[in-house]
Image (spheres, rainbow, N blue to C red):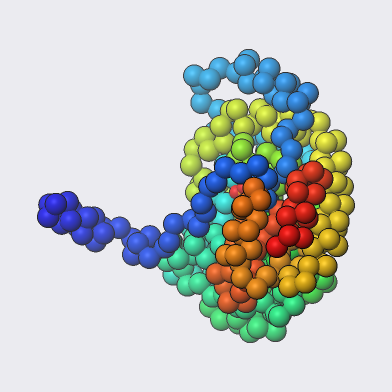
Amino acid sequence: MLKAMTATLQLSQLIRPGVLRTPAYPFEPAEVPVKLDQNESPYDFPPELKQIALERLAALPWNRYPDLHADQLRAAIARREGWDPAGVVVTAGSNALIAHLVALLRAGSTVLTVRPNFSLYALDATLLEAELREVPLEPDFSLPFQQLRAELRGSPGLLILTQPHAPTGFLDRPEQVALLIEEASGWITVLDEAYCEFSASDYRSLVAGHPDRVLLRTFSKAWGLAGLRLGYALTAPSTAEQLQKLVPAFNVNALTAAAAGVALEYPEYLTRRVQEATRERERVYNALRHHRSWTVYPSSANFLLVRTPDAAAAAAGLQRAGIRVRRQDRDPMLAGCIRISVGSPAENDTLIAAVSRL
Ligand SMILES: Cc1ncc(COP(=O)(O)O)c(C=O)c1O
Protein backbone atom coordinates (compact mmCIF):
# COMPACT_ATOMS: atom_id res chain seq x y z
CA MET A 1 0.00 0.00 0.00
CA LEU A 2 2.69 2.46 1.09
CA LYS A 3 4.86 1.36 -1.83
CA ALA A 4 2.04 2.02 -4.28
CA MET A 5 1.39 5.45 -2.75
CA THR A 6 5.07 6.39 -2.98
CA ALA A 7 5.16 5.23 -6.62
CA THR A 8 2.07 7.36 -7.45
CA LEU A 9 3.68 10.34 -5.75
CA GLN A 10 6.93 9.85 -7.68
CA LEU A 11 5.01 9.48 -10.90
CA SER A 12 3.11 12.71 -10.32
CA GLN A 13 6.46 14.48 -10.05
CA LEU A 14 7.34 13.27 -13.52
CA ILE A 15 4.01 14.12 -15.11
CA ARG A 16 3.49 17.54 -16.63
CA PRO A 17 1.59 19.67 -14.04
CA GLY A 18 -0.90 20.69 -16.73
CA VAL A 19 -1.91 17.05 -17.16
CA LEU A 20 -2.38 16.56 -13.43
CA ARG A 21 -4.47 19.73 -13.25
CA THR A 22 -6.74 18.86 -16.17
CA PRO A 23 -10.01 17.07 -15.48
CA ALA A 24 -10.94 14.09 -17.65
CA TYR A 25 -13.20 14.76 -20.63
CA PRO A 26 -16.64 15.23 -19.04
CA PHE A 27 -18.87 12.56 -20.47
CA GLU A 28 -20.87 9.66 -19.01
CA PRO A 29 -22.11 7.11 -21.52
CA ALA A 30 -25.61 5.69 -21.08
CA GLU A 31 -27.80 3.27 -23.01
CA VAL A 32 -31.12 4.92 -23.77
CA PRO A 33 -33.76 4.55 -26.50
CA VAL A 34 -33.51 8.20 -27.55
CA LYS A 35 -29.97 9.50 -27.56
CA LEU A 36 -29.88 13.28 -27.96
CA ASP A 37 -26.71 14.06 -26.02
CA GLN A 38 -23.83 14.13 -28.50
CA ASN A 39 -25.08 16.03 -31.55
CA GLU A 40 -24.71 12.95 -33.69
CA SER A 41 -26.79 12.24 -36.75
CA PRO A 42 -29.85 10.19 -35.79
CA TYR A 43 -29.21 8.04 -38.87
CA ASP A 44 -26.58 5.48 -39.71
CA PHE A 45 -24.70 5.67 -43.02
CA PRO A 46 -27.16 4.83 -45.85
CA PRO A 47 -27.24 0.98 -46.17
CA GLU A 48 -26.37 0.97 -49.88
CA LEU A 49 -23.30 3.12 -49.23
CA LYS A 50 -22.36 1.00 -46.23
CA GLN A 51 -22.44 -2.01 -48.53
CA ILE A 52 -20.04 -0.35 -51.00
CA ALA A 53 -17.78 0.65 -48.10
CA LEU A 54 -17.84 -2.88 -46.66
CA GLU A 55 -16.84 -4.36 -50.01
CA ARG A 56 -13.93 -1.93 -50.19
CA LEU A 57 -12.93 -2.72 -46.61
CA ALA A 58 -13.00 -6.46 -47.39
CA ALA A 59 -10.69 -5.94 -50.38
CA LEU A 60 -8.10 -4.03 -48.32
CA PRO A 61 -5.01 -5.73 -46.94
CA TRP A 62 -5.54 -5.23 -43.19
CA ASN A 63 -1.99 -6.36 -42.48
CA ARG A 64 -0.57 -3.30 -44.22
CA TYR A 65 -0.18 0.20 -42.84
CA PRO A 66 -2.44 2.78 -44.47
CA ASP A 67 -1.18 5.85 -46.37
CA LEU A 68 1.18 7.81 -44.12
CA HIS A 69 -0.92 10.99 -44.33
CA ALA A 70 -4.08 9.55 -45.94
CA ASP A 71 -3.15 11.14 -49.27
CA GLN A 72 -6.09 9.78 -51.27
CA LEU A 73 -8.57 10.90 -48.66
CA ARG A 74 -6.97 14.33 -48.42
CA ALA A 75 -7.20 14.65 -52.18
CA ALA A 76 -10.91 13.71 -52.10
CA ILE A 77 -11.60 16.25 -49.33
CA ALA A 78 -9.61 18.87 -51.24
CA ARG A 79 -11.70 18.27 -54.38
CA ARG A 80 -14.93 18.66 -52.44
CA GLU A 81 -13.78 21.77 -50.62
CA GLY A 82 -12.00 23.40 -53.58
CA TRP A 83 -8.76 23.43 -51.60
CA ASP A 84 -5.12 22.68 -52.28
CA PRO A 85 -4.58 19.06 -51.05
CA ALA A 86 -1.26 20.20 -49.55
CA GLY A 87 -3.28 22.41 -47.20
CA VAL A 88 -5.51 19.60 -45.90
CA VAL A 89 -4.62 17.75 -42.68
CA VAL A 90 -6.77 14.81 -41.57
CA THR A 91 -6.92 13.19 -38.15
CA ALA A 92 -9.01 10.71 -36.21
CA GLY A 93 -11.67 13.30 -35.32
CA SER A 94 -11.27 17.07 -35.36
CA ASN A 95 -10.79 17.00 -31.58
CA ALA A 96 -7.26 15.71 -32.25
CA LEU A 97 -6.60 18.75 -34.44
CA ILE A 98 -7.55 21.08 -31.59
CA ALA A 99 -4.88 19.47 -29.40
CA HIS A 100 -2.34 19.57 -32.24
CA LEU A 101 -3.02 23.25 -32.88
CA VAL A 102 -2.45 24.08 -29.21
CA ALA A 103 0.72 21.97 -29.29
CA LEU A 104 1.88 23.84 -32.39
CA LEU A 105 2.31 26.99 -30.29
CA ARG A 106 5.43 27.84 -28.38
CA ALA A 107 5.23 26.70 -24.77
CA GLY A 108 3.27 29.13 -22.59
CA SER A 109 1.60 30.95 -25.53
CA THR A 110 -1.89 32.36 -25.18
CA VAL A 111 -5.01 30.42 -26.17
CA LEU A 112 -7.78 32.98 -26.51
CA THR A 113 -11.38 31.93 -26.79
CA VAL A 114 -14.79 32.61 -25.32
CA ARG A 115 -16.75 31.15 -22.45
CA PRO A 116 -18.91 29.07 -22.41
CA ASN A 117 -17.60 27.07 -25.33
CA PHE A 118 -16.82 23.54 -26.52
CA SER A 119 -14.94 22.21 -23.49
CA LEU A 120 -11.99 20.76 -25.38
CA TYR A 121 -10.35 24.09 -26.17
CA ALA A 122 -9.87 24.87 -22.48
CA LEU A 123 -8.97 21.27 -21.63
CA ASP A 124 -6.23 21.15 -24.26
CA ALA A 125 -4.91 24.58 -23.30
CA THR A 126 -4.66 23.51 -19.64
CA LEU A 127 -3.22 20.14 -20.55
CA LEU A 128 -0.48 21.68 -22.67
CA GLU A 129 0.11 24.52 -20.22
CA ALA A 130 -0.83 27.34 -22.53
CA GLU A 131 -2.01 30.66 -21.10
CA LEU A 132 -5.79 30.23 -21.37
CA ARG A 133 -7.86 33.38 -21.75
CA GLU A 134 -11.62 32.95 -21.95
CA VAL A 135 -13.75 36.02 -22.57
CA PRO A 136 -17.41 35.71 -21.54
CA LEU A 137 -19.93 35.77 -24.39
CA GLU A 138 -22.40 38.64 -24.56
CA PRO A 139 -25.71 37.94 -22.76
CA ASP A 140 -27.34 37.11 -26.12
CA PHE A 141 -24.47 34.61 -26.75
CA SER A 142 -22.91 36.67 -29.51
CA LEU A 143 -19.13 37.09 -29.60
CA PRO A 144 -17.79 39.77 -27.22
CA PHE A 145 -16.10 41.68 -30.04
CA GLN A 146 -14.85 44.65 -28.02
CA GLN A 147 -13.29 42.50 -25.35
CA LEU A 148 -11.77 40.08 -27.82
CA ARG A 149 -10.25 43.04 -29.66
CA ALA A 150 -8.73 44.24 -26.40
CA GLU A 151 -7.33 40.75 -25.69
CA LEU A 152 -5.84 40.58 -29.18
CA ARG A 153 -3.55 43.46 -28.23
CA GLY A 154 -1.92 41.18 -25.63
CA SER A 155 0.75 38.54 -26.14
CA PRO A 156 -0.30 36.59 -29.28
CA GLY A 157 -1.07 32.90 -29.66
CA LEU A 158 -4.08 30.96 -30.85
CA LEU A 159 -7.51 32.54 -31.26
CA ILE A 160 -10.24 29.89 -31.40
CA LEU A 161 -13.71 30.80 -32.66
CA THR A 162 -16.61 28.43 -33.27
CA GLN A 163 -19.25 29.16 -35.91
CA PRO A 164 -21.98 28.23 -35.34
CA HIS A 165 -21.11 28.36 -31.70
CA ALA A 166 -21.29 25.36 -29.36
CA PRO A 167 -23.13 24.79 -27.09
CA THR A 168 -25.40 27.76 -27.82
CA GLY A 169 -25.95 27.25 -31.57
CA PHE A 170 -25.53 31.02 -32.04
CA LEU A 171 -24.24 32.23 -35.38
CA ASP A 172 -22.50 35.61 -35.45
CA ARG A 173 -22.68 38.02 -38.35
CA PRO A 174 -19.91 36.96 -40.79
CA GLU A 175 -18.89 40.58 -41.46
CA GLN A 176 -18.18 41.05 -37.77
CA VAL A 177 -16.24 37.80 -37.50
CA ALA A 178 -14.25 38.81 -40.57
CA LEU A 179 -13.40 42.18 -39.02
CA LEU A 180 -12.25 40.53 -35.82
CA ILE A 181 -10.06 38.08 -37.70
CA GLU A 182 -8.50 40.93 -39.66
CA GLU A 183 -7.48 42.36 -36.30
CA ALA A 184 -5.91 39.10 -35.21
CA SER A 185 -2.77 39.58 -37.28
CA GLY A 186 0.17 38.04 -35.49
CA TRP A 187 -2.13 35.35 -34.07
CA ILE A 188 -3.09 31.97 -35.48
CA THR A 189 -6.86 32.01 -35.88
CA VAL A 190 -8.77 28.75 -35.78
CA LEU A 191 -12.36 28.70 -36.99
CA ASP A 192 -14.10 25.54 -35.85
CA GLU A 193 -16.95 24.82 -38.26
CA ALA A 194 -18.06 21.47 -36.83
CA TYR A 195 -21.72 22.40 -37.42
CA CYS A 196 -21.44 24.62 -40.51
CA GLU A 197 -23.62 22.40 -42.72
CA PHE A 198 -26.64 23.16 -40.53
CA SER A 199 -26.13 26.92 -40.72
CA ALA A 200 -25.02 27.11 -44.36
CA SER A 201 -22.20 29.34 -43.14
CA ASP A 202 -18.82 28.92 -44.75
CA TYR A 203 -15.57 30.58 -43.73
CA ARG A 204 -13.38 29.02 -46.43
CA SER A 205 -12.92 32.28 -48.32
CA LEU A 206 -11.77 34.03 -45.15
CA VAL A 207 -9.16 31.37 -44.47
CA ALA A 208 -7.89 30.75 -48.03
CA GLY A 209 -4.53 32.33 -48.75
CA HIS A 210 -3.78 33.12 -45.08
CA PRO A 211 -1.12 30.89 -43.49
CA ASP A 212 -2.18 32.16 -40.05
CA ARG A 213 -5.77 30.90 -40.39
CA VAL A 214 -7.08 27.36 -40.01
CA LEU A 215 -10.57 25.98 -40.60
CA LEU A 216 -11.70 22.82 -38.81
CA ARG A 217 -14.44 20.53 -40.10
CA THR A 218 -15.66 17.06 -39.17
CA PHE A 219 -17.42 14.01 -40.55
CA SER A 220 -19.01 13.43 -37.13
CA LYS A 221 -22.06 15.69 -37.37
CA ALA A 222 -23.82 16.35 -40.70
CA TRP A 223 -22.05 13.46 -42.44
CA GLY A 224 -23.24 11.13 -39.69
CA LEU A 225 -19.90 9.32 -39.39
CA ALA A 226 -18.92 9.99 -35.76
CA GLY A 227 -18.00 6.32 -35.29
CA LEU A 228 -15.37 6.46 -38.03
CA ARG A 229 -13.53 9.33 -36.30
CA LEU A 230 -12.51 11.73 -39.02
CA GLY A 231 -11.90 15.45 -38.97
CA TYR A 232 -9.83 17.80 -41.09
CA ALA A 233 -8.12 21.14 -41.17
CA LEU A 234 -8.04 23.44 -44.20
CA THR A 235 -5.14 25.85 -44.17
CA ALA A 236 -2.16 27.04 -46.20
CA PRO A 237 0.31 24.31 -47.30
CA SER A 238 3.09 25.90 -45.23
CA THR A 239 0.97 25.72 -42.04
CA ALA A 240 -0.29 22.23 -42.91
CA GLU A 241 3.31 21.08 -43.21
CA GLN A 242 4.04 22.12 -39.62
CA LEU A 243 0.71 20.88 -38.23
CA GLN A 244 1.16 17.53 -39.96
CA LYS A 245 4.34 16.91 -37.92
CA LEU A 246 2.22 16.78 -34.77
CA VAL A 247 -0.21 14.22 -36.18
CA PRO A 248 0.93 10.69 -35.29
CA ALA A 249 2.00 8.75 -38.39
CA PHE A 250 -0.77 6.62 -39.95
CA ASN A 251 -3.34 8.44 -37.80
CA VAL A 252 -6.32 7.81 -40.07
CA ASN A 253 -6.78 4.09 -40.45
CA ALA A 254 -7.44 2.39 -43.77
CA LEU A 255 -11.00 1.42 -42.82
CA THR A 256 -11.99 5.01 -42.00
CA ALA A 257 -10.26 6.36 -45.10
CA ALA A 258 -12.07 3.86 -47.35
CA ALA A 259 -15.50 4.42 -45.81
CA ALA A 260 -15.17 8.22 -45.82
CA GLY A 261 -14.01 7.95 -49.43
CA VAL A 262 -17.39 6.36 -50.24
CA ALA A 263 -19.23 9.19 -48.47
CA LEU A 264 -17.30 11.74 -50.52
CA GLU A 265 -18.08 9.89 -53.75
CA TYR A 266 -21.82 9.71 -52.96
CA PRO A 267 -22.53 12.84 -50.92
CA GLU A 268 -26.17 13.23 -52.01
CA TYR A 269 -27.52 11.87 -48.72
CA LEU A 270 -25.93 14.77 -46.87
CA THR A 271 -28.20 17.43 -48.41
CA ARG A 272 -31.37 15.48 -47.60
CA ARG A 273 -30.29 14.94 -44.01
CA VAL A 274 -29.25 18.52 -43.40
CA GLN A 275 -32.59 19.69 -44.77
CA GLU A 276 -34.43 17.33 -42.44
CA ALA A 277 -32.31 18.30 -39.43
CA THR A 278 -32.86 22.03 -39.95
CA ARG A 279 -36.60 21.50 -40.49
CA GLU A 280 -36.82 19.36 -37.36
CA ARG A 281 -34.73 21.85 -35.38
CA GLU A 282 -37.30 24.55 -36.10
CA ARG A 283 -40.18 22.20 -35.27
CA VAL A 284 -38.67 21.22 -31.91
CA TYR A 285 -37.77 24.86 -31.22
CA ASN A 286 -41.37 25.95 -31.81
CA ALA A 287 -42.75 23.14 -29.67
CA LEU A 288 -40.39 23.72 -26.74
CA ARG A 289 -40.93 27.47 -26.86
CA HIS A 290 -44.37 26.98 -25.35
CA HIS A 291 -43.09 25.31 -22.20
CA ARG A 292 -44.14 27.37 -19.20
CA SER A 293 -40.75 27.52 -17.47
CA TRP A 294 -38.19 26.70 -20.19
CA THR A 295 -36.47 29.12 -22.54
CA VAL A 296 -35.24 27.68 -25.79
CA TYR A 297 -32.63 29.62 -27.74
CA PRO A 298 -32.63 29.88 -31.53
CA SER A 299 -29.91 27.69 -33.04
CA SER A 300 -28.03 27.41 -36.31
CA ALA A 301 -26.69 23.94 -35.50
CA ASN A 302 -28.17 20.45 -35.03
CA PHE A 303 -28.95 21.03 -31.36
CA LEU A 304 -30.88 23.39 -29.14
CA LEU A 305 -29.79 25.00 -25.92
CA VAL A 306 -32.59 25.18 -23.38
CA ARG A 307 -32.64 27.02 -20.06
CA THR A 308 -34.67 25.28 -17.41
CA PRO A 309 -35.18 26.07 -13.73
CA ASP A 310 -32.94 23.10 -12.85
CA ALA A 311 -30.72 21.29 -15.38
CA ALA A 312 -30.28 18.19 -13.20
CA ALA A 313 -34.05 17.82 -12.76
CA ALA A 314 -34.74 18.41 -16.47
CA ALA A 315 -32.10 15.89 -17.58
CA ALA A 316 -33.32 13.34 -15.01
CA GLY A 317 -36.95 13.84 -16.05
CA LEU A 318 -36.07 13.24 -19.69
CA GLN A 319 -33.87 10.29 -18.76
CA ARG A 320 -36.90 8.69 -17.06
CA ALA A 321 -38.70 9.05 -20.40
CA GLY A 322 -35.79 7.24 -22.08
CA ILE A 323 -34.24 10.40 -23.52
CA ARG A 324 -30.64 11.36 -22.92
CA VAL A 325 -29.65 15.03 -23.20
CA ARG A 326 -26.50 16.87 -22.14
CA ARG A 327 -26.32 19.10 -19.08
CA GLN A 328 -24.58 22.39 -19.81
CA ASP A 329 -25.02 24.12 -16.48
CA ARG A 330 -21.41 24.05 -15.39
CA ASP A 331 -20.76 27.58 -16.64
CA PRO A 332 -22.55 30.29 -14.61
CA MET A 333 -23.81 31.87 -17.83
CA LEU A 334 -25.60 28.61 -18.62
CA ALA A 335 -27.21 28.03 -15.23
CA GLY A 336 -30.09 25.58 -15.67
CA CYS A 337 -29.16 24.81 -19.27
CA ILE A 338 -29.36 21.52 -21.11
CA ARG A 339 -28.42 20.83 -24.72
CA ILE A 340 -30.70 18.70 -26.85
CA SER A 341 -29.55 17.26 -30.18
CA VAL A 342 -32.06 17.24 -33.02
CA GLY A 343 -33.10 13.64 -33.57
CA SER A 344 -35.22 11.86 -36.15
CA PRO A 345 -38.86 13.06 -36.46
CA ALA A 346 -40.00 10.10 -34.31
CA GLU A 347 -37.37 10.82 -31.64
CA ASN A 348 -38.32 14.47 -31.64
CA ASP A 349 -41.99 13.51 -31.20
CA THR A 350 -41.00 11.47 -28.15
CA LEU A 351 -39.01 14.42 -26.83
CA ILE A 352 -41.80 16.94 -27.38
CA ALA A 353 -44.31 14.66 -25.65
CA ALA A 354 -41.96 14.08 -22.70
CA VAL A 355 -41.21 17.79 -22.33
CA SER A 356 -44.91 18.62 -22.25
CA ARG A 357 -45.19 16.38 -19.17
CA LEU A 358 -42.30 18.04 -17.31
C1 LIG B 1 -17.47 22.59 -31.73
C2 LIG B 1 -16.91 21.22 -31.89
N1 LIG B 1 -15.72 21.05 -32.45
C3 LIG B 1 -15.16 19.85 -32.60
C4 LIG B 1 -15.81 18.72 -32.16
C5 LIG B 1 -15.10 17.40 -32.29
O1 LIG B 1 -15.64 16.59 -33.25
P1 LIG B 1 -14.92 15.27 -33.73
O2 LIG B 1 -13.72 15.03 -32.89
O3 LIG B 1 -15.94 14.20 -33.60
O4 LIG B 1 -14.54 15.53 -35.17
C6 LIG B 1 -17.06 18.82 -31.57
C7 LIG B 1 -17.75 17.61 -31.07
O5 LIG B 1 -18.76 17.61 -30.47
C8 LIG B 1 -17.63 20.11 -31.42
O6 LIG B 1 -18.81 20.28 -30.82
Q: Position of residue 32 (x, y in %)?
A: 61, 44
Residue located 64% across and 47% down the image: 322
Residue 205 visible within the image? no
State the residue in front, 1 or 210: 1
Residue located 70% across and 84% down the image: 146
Q: Position of residue 338 (x, y in %)?
A: 65, 63
Residue 295 is left or right of residue 86, and the answer is right
State the residue in front, 66 or 1: 1
Residue 114 is left or right of residue 25, and the answer is right
State the residue in front, 262 or 275: 275
Q: Position of residue 87 (x, y in %)?
A: 67, 47
The residue sitting at the top extreme is 59
The residue sitting at the left extreme is 2
Q: Image height check: is 30 above or below 52? A: below
Residue located 59% across and 58% down the image: 316
User: Number of callouts in the render?
Assistant: 0
Q: Image height check: is 193 above or below 140? A: above
State the residue in front, 227 or 305: 305
Residue located 44% across and 70% down the image: 108
Q: Quadrant of the C terminus?
A: bottom right
Q: Position of residue 46 (x, y in %)?
A: 77, 30
Residue 215 is left or right of residue 48, and the answer is left
Residue 350 visible within the image? yes
Q: Image height check: is 168 above or below 248? A: below
